[in-house]
Protein backbone atom coordinates (compact mmCIF):
# COMPACT_ATOMS: atom_id res chain seq x y z
CA UNK A 1 0.00 0.00 0.00
CA UNK A 2 2.85 2.32 0.84
CA UNK A 3 4.59 1.53 -2.46
CA UNK A 4 1.36 2.19 -4.36
CA UNK A 5 1.05 5.54 -2.59
CA UNK A 6 4.61 6.50 -3.53
CA UNK A 7 4.01 5.42 -7.12
CA UNK A 8 0.85 7.53 -7.35
CA UNK A 9 2.73 10.55 -6.00
CA UNK A 10 5.50 10.04 -8.57
CA UNK A 11 3.04 9.72 -11.46
CA UNK A 12 1.15 12.81 -10.30
CA UNK A 13 4.39 14.79 -10.14
CA UNK A 14 5.26 13.74 -13.67
CA UNK A 15 1.83 14.78 -14.93
CA UNK A 16 2.05 18.14 -13.19
CA UNK A 17 5.55 18.73 -14.56
CA UNK A 18 4.40 17.83 -18.04
CA UNK A 19 1.36 20.09 -17.73
CA UNK A 20 3.56 22.97 -16.51
CA UNK A 21 5.97 22.49 -19.40
CA UNK A 22 3.07 22.44 -21.84
CA UNK A 23 1.73 25.61 -20.26
CA UNK A 24 5.11 27.33 -20.62
CA UNK A 25 5.41 26.33 -24.26
CA UNK A 26 1.94 27.50 -25.17
CA UNK A 27 2.52 30.44 -27.51
CA UNK A 28 0.98 33.78 -26.64
CA UNK A 29 -1.49 35.13 -29.21
CA UNK A 30 -1.43 38.76 -30.31
CA UNK A 31 -3.48 40.97 -32.58
CA UNK A 32 -1.87 43.99 -34.24
CA UNK A 33 -3.17 46.33 -31.54
CA UNK A 34 -1.89 43.99 -28.84
CA UNK A 35 1.53 43.82 -30.51
CA UNK A 36 1.69 47.60 -30.55
CA UNK A 37 0.49 47.89 -26.96
CA UNK A 38 3.07 45.35 -25.82
CA UNK A 39 5.84 47.16 -27.72
CA UNK A 40 4.88 50.57 -26.33
CA UNK A 41 5.21 49.12 -22.84
CA UNK A 42 8.21 46.83 -23.17
CA UNK A 43 10.50 48.07 -25.93
CA UNK A 44 13.77 49.58 -24.75
CA UNK A 45 13.17 52.87 -26.55
CA UNK A 46 9.69 53.18 -25.04
CA UNK A 47 11.03 52.44 -21.56
CA UNK A 48 13.77 55.02 -22.02
CA UNK A 49 11.23 57.63 -23.13
CA UNK A 50 9.23 56.96 -19.97
CA UNK A 51 12.40 57.37 -17.93
CA UNK A 52 13.06 60.66 -19.70
CA UNK A 53 9.58 61.84 -18.69
CA UNK A 54 10.28 60.88 -15.08
CA UNK A 55 13.60 62.74 -15.22
CA UNK A 56 11.81 65.81 -16.56
CA UNK A 57 9.21 65.62 -13.78
CA UNK A 58 11.99 65.38 -11.19
CA UNK A 59 13.71 68.35 -12.84
CA UNK A 60 10.57 70.44 -12.37
CA UNK A 61 10.45 69.56 -8.68
CA UNK A 62 14.15 70.31 -8.33
CA UNK A 63 13.64 73.78 -9.80
CA UNK A 64 10.66 74.44 -7.54
CA UNK A 65 12.82 73.42 -4.57
CA UNK A 66 15.19 76.34 -5.25
CA UNK A 67 12.44 78.71 -4.11
CA UNK A 68 11.80 76.86 -0.86
CA UNK A 69 13.72 77.63 2.37
CA UNK A 70 17.30 76.38 2.27
CA UNK A 71 18.35 75.18 5.71
CA UNK A 72 21.93 74.19 6.55
CA UNK A 73 23.54 73.14 9.79
CA UNK A 74 27.18 73.60 10.74
CA UNK A 75 29.26 72.28 13.62
CA UNK A 76 32.97 72.97 13.87
CA UNK A 77 35.55 72.18 16.55
CA UNK A 78 38.94 73.87 16.04
CA UNK A 79 42.26 73.42 17.80
CA UNK A 80 44.93 76.06 17.14
CA UNK A 81 48.29 74.50 17.96
CA UNK A 82 49.97 77.88 17.51
CA UNK A 83 47.78 80.94 17.69
CA UNK A 84 48.33 83.71 15.23
CA UNK A 85 49.94 86.83 16.63
CA UNK A 86 48.39 90.21 16.33
CA UNK A 87 50.29 93.38 15.51
CA UNK A 88 49.99 96.81 17.15
CA UNK A 89 51.99 99.97 17.66
CA UNK A 90 53.80 100.52 20.99
CA UNK A 91 52.79 103.84 22.49
CA UNK A 92 55.42 103.88 25.19
CA UNK A 93 55.34 103.04 28.89
CA UNK A 94 52.42 100.94 30.04
CA UNK A 95 50.51 100.13 26.89
CA UNK A 96 47.18 98.56 27.83
CA UNK A 97 47.18 94.77 27.90
CA UNK A 98 50.78 94.79 26.60
CA UNK A 99 51.93 96.12 29.93
CA UNK A 100 55.09 98.15 30.41
CA UNK A 101 57.60 97.21 27.66
CA UNK A 102 60.12 99.94 28.50
CA UNK A 103 62.57 97.33 29.71
CA UNK A 104 62.66 95.70 26.28
CA UNK A 105 65.99 96.64 24.63
CA UNK A 106 65.87 99.17 21.82
CA UNK A 107 62.06 99.56 21.90
CA UNK A 108 60.58 102.98 21.51
CA UNK A 109 57.20 104.54 20.97
CA UNK A 110 55.85 103.93 17.48
CA UNK A 111 57.50 100.51 17.06
CA UNK A 112 55.34 97.63 15.79
CA UNK A 113 54.89 94.91 18.37
CA UNK A 114 53.89 91.28 17.56
CA UNK A 115 52.06 89.95 20.58
CA UNK A 116 50.19 86.79 21.49
CA UNK A 117 46.44 86.91 20.95
CA UNK A 118 45.11 87.53 24.43
CA UNK A 119 41.52 87.46 23.20
CA UNK A 120 41.42 83.90 21.84
CA UNK A 121 42.07 80.51 23.37
CA UNK A 122 43.60 77.67 21.43
CA UNK A 123 40.36 75.67 21.18
CA UNK A 124 36.99 76.88 19.94
CA UNK A 125 33.63 75.38 18.97
CA UNK A 126 30.70 76.63 16.94
CA UNK A 127 27.28 75.09 16.19
CA UNK A 128 24.75 76.94 14.05
CA UNK A 129 21.69 76.61 11.80
CA UNK A 130 21.28 78.98 8.87
CA UNK A 131 18.09 79.56 6.90
CA UNK A 132 18.05 81.27 3.51
CA UNK A 133 14.85 82.16 1.69
CA UNK A 134 14.81 83.44 -1.87
CA UNK A 135 12.40 86.36 -2.16
CA UNK A 136 12.92 87.49 -5.74
CA UNK A 137 15.05 86.16 -8.61
CA UNK A 138 14.28 86.67 -12.28
CA UNK A 139 16.36 83.63 -13.21
CA UNK A 140 14.36 81.48 -10.80
CA UNK A 141 11.04 82.54 -12.34
CA UNK A 142 12.35 81.80 -15.83
CA UNK A 143 13.77 78.52 -14.58
CA UNK A 144 10.31 77.42 -13.49
CA UNK A 145 9.00 78.08 -16.99
CA UNK A 146 11.99 76.30 -18.56
CA UNK A 147 11.52 73.21 -16.40
CA UNK A 148 7.91 72.93 -17.53
CA UNK A 149 9.01 73.40 -21.15
CA UNK A 150 11.61 70.68 -20.67
CA UNK A 151 8.91 68.38 -19.33
CA UNK A 152 6.75 69.16 -22.36
CA UNK A 153 9.69 68.33 -24.63
CA UNK A 154 10.10 64.92 -22.97
CA UNK A 155 6.45 64.08 -23.65
CA UNK A 156 6.65 65.16 -27.27
CA UNK A 157 9.86 63.21 -27.76
CA UNK A 158 8.16 60.17 -26.24
CA UNK A 159 5.32 60.56 -28.74
CA UNK A 160 7.84 60.64 -31.59
CA UNK A 161 9.47 57.48 -30.22
CA UNK A 162 6.10 55.75 -29.95
CA UNK A 163 5.35 56.64 -33.54
CA UNK A 164 8.57 54.99 -34.70
CA UNK A 165 7.79 51.90 -32.62
CA UNK A 166 4.30 51.64 -34.11
CA UNK A 167 5.69 51.94 -37.62
CA UNK A 168 8.28 49.20 -37.08
CA UNK A 169 5.92 46.81 -35.30
CA UNK A 170 3.16 47.27 -37.89
CA UNK A 171 5.48 46.49 -40.78
CA UNK A 172 6.84 43.41 -39.01
CA UNK A 173 3.29 42.24 -38.25
CA UNK A 174 2.23 42.68 -41.88
CA UNK A 175 5.29 40.70 -42.99
CA UNK A 176 4.15 37.76 -40.84
CA UNK A 177 0.63 37.98 -42.29
CA UNK A 178 1.91 37.99 -45.87
CA UNK A 179 4.28 35.10 -45.31
CA UNK A 180 1.58 33.08 -43.60
CA UNK A 181 -0.82 33.68 -46.50
CA UNK A 182 1.84 32.69 -49.02
CA UNK A 183 2.57 29.54 -47.01
CA UNK A 184 -1.10 28.59 -47.29
CA UNK A 185 -0.90 29.17 -51.05
CA UNK A 186 2.09 26.87 -51.26
CA UNK A 187 0.10 24.21 -49.41
CA UNK A 188 -2.83 24.57 -51.82
CA UNK A 189 -0.54 24.47 -54.85
CA UNK A 190 1.21 21.37 -53.53
CA UNK A 191 -2.15 19.70 -53.05
CA UNK A 192 -3.21 20.59 -56.58
CA UNK A 193 0.07 19.33 -58.10
CA UNK A 194 -0.09 16.20 -55.97
CA UNK A 195 -3.52 15.46 -57.34
CA UNK A 196 -2.29 16.11 -60.88
CA UNK A 197 0.74 13.89 -60.28
CA UNK A 198 -1.41 11.04 -59.04
CA UNK A 199 -3.80 11.25 -61.98
CA UNK A 200 -0.95 11.52 -64.48
CA UNK A 201 0.79 8.52 -62.89
CA UNK A 202 -2.43 6.53 -63.21
CA UNK A 203 -2.78 7.57 -66.84
CA UNK A 204 0.82 6.50 -67.45
CA UNK A 205 0.18 3.06 -65.96
CA UNK A 206 -2.82 2.65 -68.24
CA UNK A 207 -0.88 3.78 -71.29
CA UNK A 208 -2.64 7.13 -71.72
CA UNK A 209 0.33 9.31 -70.69
CA UNK A 210 4.07 9.16 -71.18
CA UNK A 211 6.53 8.77 -68.34
CA UNK A 212 8.07 12.11 -69.28
CA UNK A 213 4.76 13.73 -68.41
CA UNK A 214 4.98 12.21 -64.94
CA UNK A 215 8.59 13.35 -64.54
CA UNK A 216 7.78 16.88 -65.67
CA UNK A 217 5.00 17.25 -63.09
CA UNK A 218 7.16 15.62 -60.42
CA UNK A 219 9.90 18.19 -61.04
CA UNK A 220 7.40 21.00 -60.45
CA UNK A 221 6.04 19.17 -57.42
CA UNK A 222 9.51 18.78 -55.88
CA UNK A 223 10.39 22.41 -56.59
CA UNK A 224 7.29 23.78 -54.96
CA UNK A 225 7.79 21.61 -51.89
CA UNK A 226 11.37 22.89 -51.55
CA UNK A 227 10.12 26.47 -51.94
CA UNK A 228 7.54 25.88 -49.25
CA UNK A 229 10.20 24.64 -46.80
CA UNK A 230 12.30 27.74 -47.45
CA UNK A 231 9.26 29.94 -46.96
CA UNK A 232 8.43 28.28 -43.65
CA UNK A 233 11.88 29.29 -42.42
CA UNK A 234 11.36 32.82 -43.72
CA UNK A 235 8.05 32.93 -41.86
CA UNK A 236 9.82 31.88 -38.65
CA UNK A 237 12.37 34.62 -39.22
CA UNK A 238 9.62 37.21 -39.69
CA UNK A 239 8.17 36.15 -36.33
CA UNK A 240 11.60 36.62 -34.77
CA UNK A 241 11.75 40.11 -36.26
CA UNK A 242 8.34 40.91 -34.81
CA UNK A 243 9.43 39.72 -31.37
CA UNK A 244 12.56 41.84 -31.66
CA UNK A 245 10.54 44.96 -32.51
CA UNK A 246 8.22 44.25 -29.56
CA UNK A 247 11.11 43.37 -27.22
CA UNK A 248 9.29 40.08 -26.65
CA UNK A 249 11.40 37.25 -25.15
CA UNK A 250 13.16 35.64 -28.10
CA UNK A 251 13.07 32.18 -26.49
CA UNK A 252 9.28 32.27 -26.05
CA UNK A 253 6.87 31.22 -28.83
CA UNK A 254 4.39 33.70 -30.23
CA UNK A 255 1.44 33.58 -32.59
CA UNK A 256 -0.49 36.37 -34.25
CA UNK A 257 -4.14 36.54 -35.20
CA UNK A 258 -5.67 38.40 -38.08
CA UNK A 259 -5.94 38.07 -41.81
CA UNK A 260 -4.60 40.09 -44.70
CA UNK A 261 -8.17 40.53 -45.92
CA UNK A 262 -8.81 42.57 -42.78
CA UNK A 263 -6.07 45.06 -43.69
CA UNK A 264 -7.47 48.06 -45.55
CA UNK A 265 -5.04 49.48 -48.04
CA UNK A 266 -7.45 51.46 -50.18
CA UNK A 267 -7.42 55.16 -49.40
CA UNK A 268 -7.52 58.52 -51.17
CA UNK A 269 -4.36 60.56 -50.86
CA UNK A 270 -6.48 63.69 -51.33
CA UNK A 271 -8.25 62.99 -48.06
CA UNK A 272 -4.89 63.15 -46.27
CA UNK A 273 -4.19 66.61 -47.68
CA UNK A 274 -7.51 68.17 -46.66
CA UNK A 275 -6.94 70.44 -43.65
CA UNK A 276 -3.49 69.00 -43.04
CA UNK A 277 -0.97 71.01 -40.99
CA UNK A 278 2.72 70.55 -40.26
CA UNK A 279 1.97 70.81 -36.54
CA UNK A 280 0.43 67.32 -36.44
CA UNK A 281 3.85 65.82 -37.07
CA UNK A 282 5.73 64.59 -34.01
CA UNK A 283 9.09 65.90 -35.20
CA UNK A 284 7.55 69.33 -35.77
CA UNK A 285 6.18 69.32 -32.22
CA UNK A 286 9.62 68.40 -30.86
CA UNK A 287 11.21 71.28 -32.77
CA UNK A 288 8.56 73.67 -31.41
CA UNK A 289 9.42 72.54 -27.88
CA UNK A 290 13.12 73.11 -28.54
CA UNK A 291 12.35 76.59 -29.83
CA UNK A 292 10.42 77.37 -26.67
CA UNK A 293 13.39 76.27 -24.55
CA UNK A 294 15.76 78.43 -26.58
CA UNK A 295 13.49 81.45 -26.15
CA UNK A 296 13.53 80.86 -22.40
CA UNK A 297 17.34 80.67 -22.49
CA UNK A 298 17.37 84.19 -23.92
CA UNK A 299 14.85 85.34 -21.36
CA UNK A 300 16.96 83.85 -18.59
CA UNK A 301 20.01 85.85 -19.73
CA UNK A 302 18.00 89.06 -19.47
CA UNK A 303 16.59 88.00 -16.10
CA UNK A 304 20.12 87.46 -14.81
CA UNK A 305 20.62 91.25 -14.96
CA UNK A 306 17.82 91.83 -12.42
CA UNK A 307 18.50 92.21 -8.69
CA UNK A 308 18.20 89.18 -6.44
CA UNK A 309 16.64 89.54 -3.01
CA UNK A 310 16.87 86.94 -0.28
CA UNK A 311 16.36 86.75 3.49
CA UNK A 312 18.62 84.91 5.89
CA UNK A 313 18.81 84.05 9.55
CA UNK A 314 21.34 82.22 11.71
CA UNK A 315 20.94 80.71 15.17
CA UNK A 316 24.04 79.30 16.84
CA UNK A 317 26.23 78.63 19.87
CA UNK A 318 29.96 79.13 20.38
CA UNK A 319 32.60 78.64 23.02
CA UNK A 320 36.36 78.57 23.63
CA UNK A 321 38.56 76.53 25.91
CA UNK A 322 42.18 76.29 26.91
CA UNK A 323 42.19 72.54 26.23
CA UNK A 324 40.34 70.57 23.53
CA UNK A 325 38.52 68.30 25.99
CA UNK A 326 37.04 71.36 27.62
CA UNK A 327 34.90 71.98 24.54
CA UNK A 328 32.75 68.98 25.48
CA UNK A 329 32.00 70.13 29.01
CA UNK A 330 28.63 71.69 29.70
CA UNK A 331 30.02 74.02 32.34
CA UNK A 332 33.50 75.51 32.39
CA UNK A 333 33.08 78.06 35.14
CA UNK A 334 33.33 80.91 32.67
CA UNK A 335 31.61 83.96 34.05
CA UNK A 336 29.51 85.68 31.43
CA UNK A 337 29.54 89.42 31.89
CA UNK A 338 26.22 89.50 30.05
CA UNK A 339 24.62 87.84 33.03
CA UNK A 340 23.98 84.41 31.56
CA UNK A 341 25.96 82.59 34.21
CA UNK A 342 28.70 79.99 33.94
CA UNK A 343 27.23 78.09 30.91
CA UNK A 344 29.92 76.73 28.55
CA UNK A 345 28.16 77.38 25.21
CA UNK A 346 26.70 80.81 24.47
CA UNK A 347 24.01 81.46 21.92
CA UNK A 348 24.05 84.10 19.22
CA UNK A 349 21.64 84.97 16.39
CA UNK A 350 21.39 87.19 13.35
CA UNK A 351 18.96 87.81 10.53
CA UNK A 352 18.64 90.19 7.63
CA UNK A 353 18.05 90.80 3.93
CA UNK A 354 20.49 90.46 1.09
CA UNK A 355 20.26 92.45 -2.15
CA UNK A 356 22.52 91.45 -5.01
CA UNK A 357 22.60 93.90 -7.93
CA UNK A 358 24.71 93.02 -11.00
CA UNK A 359 26.44 96.17 -12.19
CA UNK A 360 29.15 95.32 -14.69
CA UNK A 361 30.60 91.98 -15.81
CA UNK A 362 32.83 92.91 -18.69
CA UNK A 363 30.05 92.71 -21.33
CA UNK A 364 29.77 88.94 -20.73
CA UNK A 365 26.00 89.12 -20.41
CA UNK A 366 25.71 91.01 -23.69
CA UNK A 367 27.66 88.42 -25.65
CA UNK A 368 25.88 85.51 -23.98
CA UNK A 369 22.57 86.98 -25.12
CA UNK A 370 23.97 87.35 -28.65
CA UNK A 371 24.98 83.68 -28.64
CA UNK A 372 21.54 82.54 -27.47
CA UNK A 373 19.83 84.69 -30.11
CA UNK A 374 22.01 83.19 -32.83
CA UNK A 375 21.14 79.71 -31.54
CA UNK A 376 17.47 80.66 -31.80
CA UNK A 377 18.01 81.64 -35.43
CA UNK A 378 19.45 78.19 -36.07
CA UNK A 379 16.32 76.61 -34.58
CA UNK A 380 14.13 78.81 -36.76
CA UNK A 381 16.16 77.76 -39.80
CA UNK A 382 15.48 74.20 -38.71
CA UNK A 383 11.76 74.82 -39.27
CA UNK A 384 12.43 75.73 -42.88
CA UNK A 385 14.51 72.61 -43.42
CA UNK A 386 11.99 70.41 -41.62
CA UNK A 387 9.07 71.71 -43.67
CA UNK A 388 10.95 71.05 -46.89
CA UNK A 389 11.76 67.54 -45.71
CA UNK A 390 8.14 66.92 -44.71
CA UNK A 391 6.92 68.17 -48.11
CA UNK A 392 9.26 65.76 -49.85
CA UNK A 393 8.30 62.89 -47.54
CA UNK A 394 4.57 63.38 -48.05
CA UNK A 395 4.98 63.56 -51.82
CA UNK A 396 7.13 60.45 -51.88
CA UNK A 397 4.74 58.58 -49.60
CA UNK A 398 1.73 59.61 -51.70
CA UNK A 399 3.42 58.63 -54.95
CA UNK A 400 4.64 55.31 -53.56
CA UNK A 401 1.18 54.51 -52.21
CA UNK A 402 -0.57 55.36 -55.46
CA UNK A 403 1.95 53.31 -57.45
CA UNK A 404 1.56 50.42 -55.01
CA UNK A 405 -2.24 50.48 -55.44
CA UNK A 406 -1.87 50.51 -59.23
CA UNK A 407 0.52 47.57 -59.13
CA UNK A 408 -1.71 45.71 -56.67
CA UNK A 409 -4.74 46.08 -58.96
CA UNK A 410 -2.77 44.79 -61.96
CA UNK A 411 -1.25 41.87 -60.06
CA UNK A 412 -4.65 40.91 -58.63
CA UNK A 413 -6.06 40.75 -62.14
CA UNK A 414 -3.04 38.78 -63.37
CA UNK A 415 -3.41 36.27 -60.54
CA UNK A 416 -7.11 35.77 -61.31
CA UNK A 417 -6.34 35.31 -65.00
CA UNK A 418 -3.50 32.89 -64.29
CA UNK A 419 -5.76 30.92 -61.98
CA UNK A 420 -8.41 30.68 -64.64
CA UNK A 421 -5.83 29.60 -67.25
CA UNK A 422 -4.48 26.91 -64.93
CA UNK A 423 -7.98 25.62 -64.21
CA UNK A 424 -8.99 25.42 -67.90
CA UNK A 425 -5.63 23.91 -68.93
CA UNK A 426 -5.99 21.18 -66.35
CA UNK A 427 -9.52 20.38 -67.53
CA UNK A 428 -8.36 20.20 -71.15
CA UNK A 429 -5.49 17.91 -70.17
CA UNK A 430 -7.78 15.58 -68.21
CA UNK A 431 -10.13 15.43 -71.23
CA UNK A 432 -7.24 14.57 -73.53
CA UNK A 433 -7.31 17.77 -75.60
CA UNK A 434 -4.38 19.50 -73.89
CA UNK A 435 -0.72 18.77 -73.28
CA UNK A 436 1.13 18.12 -70.11
CA UNK A 437 3.55 20.95 -70.90
CA UNK A 438 0.71 23.43 -70.99
CA UNK A 439 -0.44 22.30 -67.55
CA UNK A 440 3.03 22.65 -66.03
CA UNK A 441 3.55 26.07 -67.64
CA UNK A 442 0.13 27.22 -66.42
CA UNK A 443 0.94 26.10 -62.86
CA UNK A 444 4.30 27.89 -62.95
CA UNK A 445 2.67 31.04 -64.27
CA UNK A 446 0.04 30.86 -61.54
CA UNK A 447 2.67 30.55 -58.81
CA UNK A 448 4.58 33.49 -60.25
CA UNK A 449 1.41 35.56 -60.45
CA UNK A 450 0.58 34.69 -56.85
CA UNK A 451 4.09 35.68 -55.74
CA UNK A 452 3.82 38.97 -57.59
CA UNK A 453 0.40 39.66 -56.10
CA UNK A 454 1.45 39.13 -52.51
CA UNK A 455 4.61 41.14 -53.04
CA UNK A 456 2.47 43.96 -54.42
CA UNK A 457 0.05 43.58 -51.50
CA UNK A 458 2.86 43.81 -48.96
CA UNK A 459 4.27 46.88 -50.74
CA UNK A 460 0.82 48.50 -50.58
CA UNK A 461 0.45 47.71 -46.87
CA UNK A 462 3.88 49.14 -46.10
CA UNK A 463 3.22 52.18 -48.31
CA UNK A 464 0.00 52.80 -46.37
CA UNK A 465 1.94 52.75 -43.09
CA UNK A 466 4.50 55.19 -44.50
CA UNK A 467 1.69 57.41 -45.77
CA UNK A 468 0.09 57.54 -42.32
CA UNK A 469 3.50 58.31 -40.82
CA UNK A 470 4.18 61.11 -43.33
CA UNK A 471 0.86 62.83 -42.56
CA UNK A 472 1.10 62.32 -38.79
CA UNK A 473 -1.81 59.87 -38.60
CA UNK A 474 0.02 56.77 -37.48
CA UNK A 475 -0.72 57.30 -33.79
CA UNK A 476 -4.43 56.71 -33.28
CA UNK A 477 -6.56 57.46 -30.26
CA UNK A 478 -6.18 53.86 -29.10
CA UNK A 479 -2.40 53.72 -29.37
CA UNK A 480 -1.53 57.25 -28.28
CA UNK A 481 0.12 57.39 -24.88
Image (tube, helix red, strand yellow):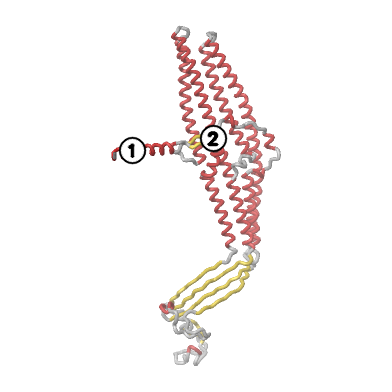
Distance between mark 1 and mark 2 Cα atoms: 47 Å
Closer to us: mark 1 or mark 2?
1
Residue 276 vs residue 480, the one in the foreground:
480
10 Å neighbourhood of mark 2: few (<14), some, or many (≥20)? many
Nearer-the-camera pick, 309 or 177 = 177
How many numbered marks have been drawn onto this rendered protein structure?
2
Above or below: residue 111 compared with residue 365: below
Q: Position of residue 327 (x, y in %)?
A: 44, 78
Can residue 152 be seen by looking at this rendering? yes
- Residue hosting label 2: 173
Quadrant in the rendering for residue 206: top left
Residue 367 can be seen, yes or no: no
Where does residue 386 sit, x and y in percent of width and height? Answer: 64, 43
* Residue with the mark numbered 1: 8
Q: Position of residue 455 (x, y in %)?
A: 56, 28
In the rendered image, the residue lying farthest to the right is 275
Q: Taking 439 as reference, is 149 above or below it?
A: below
N-term-proximal mark, 1 vs 2: 1
Q: Residue furthest top?
A: 207
Quarter of the image where the C terminus is located: top right
Quarter where residue 298 is shown? bottom right
Seen from the viewer's position, the closer of residues 323 and 328 is: 328
Q: Secondary structure at mark 1?
A: helix
In which quadrant of the rendered image does the N terminus lie?
Answer: top left
- Which residue is at 62% across, 24% downward? 410
Amino acid sequence: MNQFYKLSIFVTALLVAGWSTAQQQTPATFTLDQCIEYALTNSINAQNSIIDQQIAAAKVKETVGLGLPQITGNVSLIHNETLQRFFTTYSGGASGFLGDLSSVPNIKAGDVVAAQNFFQLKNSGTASVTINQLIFSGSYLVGLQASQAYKDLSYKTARQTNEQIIQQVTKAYYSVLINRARTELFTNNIGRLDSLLRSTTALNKNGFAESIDVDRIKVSYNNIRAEREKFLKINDLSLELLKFQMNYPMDQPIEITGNIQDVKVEASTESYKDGWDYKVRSDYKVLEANKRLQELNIKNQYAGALPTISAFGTLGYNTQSGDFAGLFKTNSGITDQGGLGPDKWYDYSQFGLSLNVPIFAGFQKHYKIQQEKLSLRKVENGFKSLKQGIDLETKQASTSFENALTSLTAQKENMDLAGNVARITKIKYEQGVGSNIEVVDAENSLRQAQTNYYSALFDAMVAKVDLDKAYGKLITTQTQK
